[in-house]
Amino acid sequence: MRLRFLIVFLPIYMAGKANRADSLINLLKKNLPDTERVNILNRLCYEKYLSDVNSAFPYGTEALRLAKKINYKKGAVLSLIYISYLEKSRGDFTKAFLLADSALAVSKKEHYDNLTVKALNQKGNLYGDNGNLARSLSFYLEAAGISEKNNDKKALVGTYANIGINFISLRQFEKSEEYLRKAIIVSEGSDDLKSVGNLYNNMGAMFLESNKLDSAEANFKKGQQIYTRAKYTRGLAYSMYYLGFIYNRTKNYKAALESFEKAGEINKESGNSYELSNIYNCIADVYISMNKPDQSLQYAKKSLEEALREKSGFDIKEAYLVLKKSYELKGDYETALEYYSKYTGVKDSLFNTESSKQVAEMQTKYETEKKETENKLLQEKNESSTKTIKQQRYFGIAVGIICILLVAFAIVIFRSNKQKQRINVELERKNILIERQKELVEEKQKEILDSIHYAKRIQRSLLTSEKYIARNLNKLSNKN
């Protein structure tokens, strides 16, 4: 059985996506502002990515080209993230990493928090797919920190779900449950029922991996109810599939067959034939457990037919193994050995392919981490240069301020000296006037004194004549 973890905001098929894409294409035919064209191209890129990766590339690259031309940074960052999605889907992780790095650098520099969260989640996905779960987790946690700070509930739900899924892969089930429950709590009241259903399915997958079957069943049934309300058949098929697996493990074979058959019908009706081989294989396995080789062979052959049509090596291998078990149960050991030989042949081929893939992924991982280290060193160098430039700028500003203060001080001193000079001149002029007035006063005093002295001389002369007259009168009197 293959466990599938459902990404909360990235379901593979979405109802009405074709109609939305057609509407967006029609909008492009109108005379729109360039920024609006970039936004529509990005939305088209994402819509096409959900169904046909190759058809999405022209829209993403055109959005990026136009955004750069008009210096629309938000649009450019979103284009980089979406094209990173596309490159990851095509298996080119080196390009996907570089695009995500570029998007992250710009979004952080421009403080586009919502786009930073998207870029961080993409980096987490890329590292997770390359097996570096610890590195992956660090990016998810950073994204969660930004979303918590901004109380961005939609981003928080997706990020918490990614962290929870990451912890499932790390076999840290308590931490996984903690973050998946956080995601469910934040999503309460959300009208995005598909995403809420995905959360319960992921919670169920976590309990299934930790062998807590009752809790797993309860969560898958909750997801089933929500998908039914949302009329989201693909999610409903996943819930039924997981429930079938649980019922088979608990030997409730009737319920297991009903769940698997229902999941098969839903996938067939929705055109999702990729899952049919795995489901038919599960039904065959149930019949083996029930000791019914004929029914098991019927579904094992259907599984092989679908696997060959889809060219899925893994499903072909699993179909061969179930066919081997079915023929063994029937007592046809020769045919069983034949299918076992085919099983081991495909298994060895897949092992070699997987080994080559792992070597390629390790090389990609090495090159990516090397590039990331170089980018980090370059960023540190740029930050150091920026810091030096800032210090030089601050020093220049300080010198400028000091110069201005010195000039102002010199002007104040100069004006003060000029003022003192004017005051001194005025004082000197007043002193001269005072001296002149003093001289005039002294002259007047001298004139007055001279007049007084003159009057005294006259007075003395008069007094002398009077004495003389009086003496002569006296003499005359005596003679008489």
Image: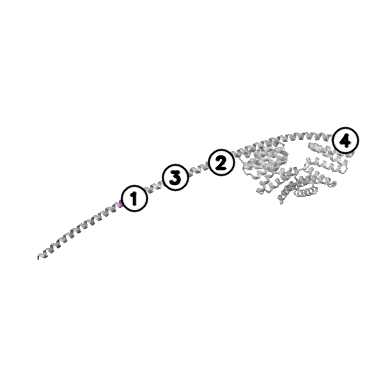
Which marked residue is nearer to the observer: mark 4 or mark 2? 2
Q: Earlier in the sequence, mark 2 or mark 3?
A: 2
Q: Secondary structure at mark 3?
A: helix
From which residue to which does the magenta span run?
Answer: 432-437
Residue under label 1, please give it.
431
Q: CA distance from mark 4 to mark 2?
A: 81 Å
- Give the left or right position of residue 242, taking residue 75 as reference: right
Which marked residue is nearer to the observer: mark 1 or mark 2? 1
Q: Earlier in the sequence, mark 1 or mark 3?
A: 3
Which marked residue is nearer to the observer: mark 3 or mark 4? 3
Residue in the picture at 25% in, 55% down: 449
Residue 19 location (% of width, % of height)? 71, 44
Name the dominant secondary structure of the magenta segment.
Answer: helix
Q: Secondary structure at mark 4?
A: helix
Which marked residue is nearer to the observer: mark 4 or mark 1? 1
Residue in the picture at 80% in, 34% down: 348
